[in-house]
Image: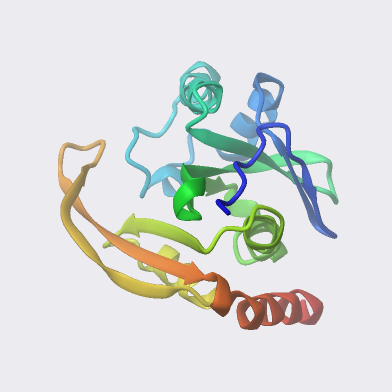
Amino acid sequence: MPAKTPASTTTLTGAHVRLEPLSRDHLPGLFLAGGRDEEVWRWLTVTPPESEEELGELLDARLAEVAAGAAVAFAVIDLATGKPVGWTTYLDIAPVDERLEIGWTWYARSVWRSAVNTESKLLLLTHAFEDLGMGRVQWKTDHLNTRSQNAIARLGAQREGVLRRHRLRADGSWRDSVYFSMLVDEWPAAKARLTNRLLEG
């Protein structure tokens, strides 16, 4: 029995964040949260947006992927403020193979090292494994982005390997991509760790 395809209308709510379908309505808040911050965009393969219009072009590209059935994109809403603080995406969705990827994620620097990323991943992983029936969730990141690699490893994901000269960076250089994954039988232990981390603050 193949896994289910995630719905683009899905909303996932926790104690700290709500993940809701990304839309153009989120654009002004997202630009205030992370637009023009080069550190936020450093490891994504795009040029940091200098204007709301440029961020809108990136947002529209995500929405086009959603419309094509290739991705499900979420705005990350900080429940304490009600404001968007980033976005995250399910991509490379393959229900027959029971796998998907979590990626195209960025957060405002103001919520780094907070509960936002931990709970966002807990919500996304719970939905993927428990509601959709996925057997594998994967991530990839720039081989120079040690902060992201450490964050993915702390989720309980396993580093699998490196794809060399995999993606062209916005500056014209080539990156290697480090792949991580979590399998469904690894999920219960990872879920317990993430839940405990949130409880401990």
Relative vertical location of residue 26 with respect to residue 99 in this rendering, above or below? above
| Vertical comparison of 39 with 192: above or below | above
User: What x and y, as percent, mark residue 165?
Assistant: 14, 51
Give the camera-side residue of 188 and 149: 188
- The residue closer to the viewer here, 4 or 47, is 4
**Which of 106 and 167 lies nearest the eye of the viewer?**
167
Residue 161 lies, in percent from the top left, at 26, 69
- The answer to whether any part of residue 51 appears in the image is no
Q: Against 52, is 171 above or below?
A: below
Give the residue drawn at x 69%, y 30%: 29
Q: Quadrant of the C terminus?
A: bottom right
**Could you tell me if residue 159 is visible in this image?**
yes
Going 51% across and 20% down the picture, which residue do you hit? Answer: 60
Q: Residue furthest top?
A: 53
List x then y, in percent, for residue 172: 16, 37
Q: Where is residue 20 drawn, in percent x and y?
A: 74, 38
Give the left or right position of residue 43, taking residue 138 as reference.
left
Which residue is drawn at the image coordinates 77% and 39% (left, top)?
83
- Judging from the image, the colouring scheme is rainbow
| Residue most extreme to the front | 1
Would residue 116 appear left or right of 137 to someone viewing this image? Answer: right
Tell me the residue at 63%/42% (across/down).
6
Looking at the rendered image, the quarter that the N terminus falls into is bottom right
